[in-house]
């Protein structure tokens, strides 16, 4: 009895200190919003007031609130949302994001089928206000966007909380274990956790989540489909940028210093493969200008997608300085490098090129989705590279062997087909499956 009182006291103190930090930050966050509104910074509108719990809604309540941190999580959740809407056409869904790019992707993918809000900052009053206005019947958090006060408020307000496609790296597990007074109640708030791999399943168990509250659903990222509009966009890109005679090495979702490394490898390769074109797609739009200046300083002949500059025979790099084009570009690539993997960001989604039967290069940093990378690697669809020399060697291997390149690329597509089923498992685990249509 005494031990439980002490534990409960520690939890209250931890949440009090955590919430106090948010209280101290609130004036700065509000001033930043006002400043961005005054200078009319792109993406900043009154819709951002939902970060302080203030928002408008035309509906008395919403069936489901799904939170996705940014673009990648929104794309991941697309097929789950669409299947849910197919099962229950009348269901009302809200998707929240933290970023403008995430908000834009929600609008692009779902149009008026889904409402979008920015997630409130994790101060208790903001979260409470937001939930009171939105009145969700269930909350789904996608992957790993965990906020202590949000989780605590959902439990206090009797709103069932679920984690879907749950990811939990060893690094994050160690961090959560260091602060049990703050994070243990957070994990206790979940009705159910859907783990995307065996690693994640074991890590949630080590964090004290009971076995009956975890389901190994596997990764819903495997539930990729090719959108016909992406194929159409690919054809438009070929025509607009004059790519019909070019062989494409695509660097997707790159971070610093990956552009420099890919460029070094490309310059070595281009001496042999004269029609090879490097297409760079930086992960974040705020880096478009920086990458452009990097290329200019090295006297690289570039074309910009935003300016619809056609590539001639001397063009070395096509810089994609627009959002929403990556998957259409993967479809055009002969070889794809997936970023965030040399830059130690955990690696981005290797399945996006795999669905187009494109062989993949990635660096050693793949802690975001290690099971996916290992599965693709075991199938021969992915090679690990550490530097420009590795990239050059791997590219030569595939550029010189068309049959082998096609074989390895198709192995990636086969991996996706063999690992489908996670969405139905997820919907069943969170009580939203239509058993008549599975």
Image: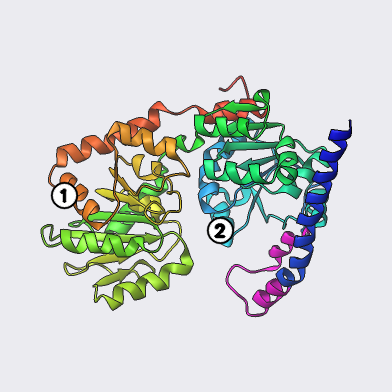
Pinpoint residue 213: horizontal percent, then vertical percent. 67, 27
**Residue lying at the far top of the rendered structure:** 436
Q: Is residue 221 magenta?
A: no
Q: Is residue 43 magenta?
A: yes
Question: What span is colored magenta in the figure?
Answer: 31-53
Dominant secondary structure, magenta? helix
Residue in the image at 39% along x and 44% along y: 350
Give the residue pinned by disc 1: 396
Give the residue pinned by disc 2: 104
Pinpoint residue 390: horizontal percent, then vertical percent. 23, 51
Q: Is residue 340 visible?
A: yes
Q: Is residue 267 left or right of residue 68?
A: left
Label 1 CA crowd tier, 10 Å (few <14, some 14–19, many 20+): some
Pinpoint residue 175: horizontal percent, then vertical percent. 61, 46
Asked whether 215 or 44 is in front, the reply is 215
Label 1 sits on a secondary structure element that is helix
**Residues at marks 1 and 2, CA–CA distance in whole angstroms:** 38 Å
């Amino acid at each position: 009895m005494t031990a439980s009182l002490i534990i409960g006291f520690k939890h209250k103190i931890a949440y009090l200190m955590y919430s106090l930090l948010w209280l101290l930050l609130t004036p700065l966050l509000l001033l930043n919003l006002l400043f961005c509104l005054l200078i009319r910074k792109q993406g900043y509108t009154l819709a951002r007031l939902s970060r302080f719990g203030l928002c408008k809604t035309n509906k008395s309540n919403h069936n489901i609130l799904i939170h996705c941190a940014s673009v990648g999580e929104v794309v991941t959740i697309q097929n789950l949302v669409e299947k849910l809407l197919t099962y229950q056409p009348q269901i009302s869904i809200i998707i929240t994001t933290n970023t403008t790019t995430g908000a834009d992707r929600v609008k692009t993918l779902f149009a008026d089928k889904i409402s979008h809000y920015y997630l409130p900052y994790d101060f208790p009053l903001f979260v409470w206000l937001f939930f009171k206005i939105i009145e969700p019947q269930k909350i789904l958090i996608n992957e790993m966007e965990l906020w202590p006060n949000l989780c605590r408020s959902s439990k206090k307000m009797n709103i069932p909380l679920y984690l879907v496609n749950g990811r939990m790296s060893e690094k994050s597990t160690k961090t959560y274990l260091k602060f049990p007074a703050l994070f243990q109640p957070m994990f206790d708030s979940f009705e159910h956790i859907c783990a995307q791999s065996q690693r994640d399943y074991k890590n949630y168990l080590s964090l004290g989540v009971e076995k009956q509250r975890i389901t190994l659903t596997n990764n819903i990222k495997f539930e990729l489909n090719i959108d016909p509009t992406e194929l159409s966009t690919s054809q438009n890109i070929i025509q607009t940028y004059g790519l019909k005679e070019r062989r494409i090495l695509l660097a997707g979702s790159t971070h610093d210093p990956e552009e420099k490394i890919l460029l070094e490898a490309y310059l070595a390769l281009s001496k042999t493969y004269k029609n090879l074109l490097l297409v760079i797609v930086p992960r974040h739009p705020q880096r478009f200008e920086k990458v452009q200046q990097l290329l200019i300083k090295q006297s690289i002949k570039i074309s910009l997608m935003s300016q619809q500059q056609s590539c001639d025979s001397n063009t070395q790099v096509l810089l994609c300085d627009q959002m929403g084009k990556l998957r259409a570009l993967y479809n055009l690539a002969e070889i794809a490098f997936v970023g965030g993997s040399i830059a130690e960001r955990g690696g981005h989604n290797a399945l996006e090129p795999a669905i187009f039967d494109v062989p993949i290069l990635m660096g050693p940093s793949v802690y975001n989705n290690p099971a996916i990378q290992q599965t693709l690697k075991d199938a021969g669809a992915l090679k690990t590279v550490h530097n420009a020399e590795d990239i050059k060697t791997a590219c030569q291997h595939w550029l010189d062997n068309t049959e082998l390149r096609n074989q390895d690329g198709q192995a990636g597509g086969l991996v996706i087909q063999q690992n489908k089923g996670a969405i139905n498992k997820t919907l069943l685990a969170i009580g939203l499956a239509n058993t008549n249509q599975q």
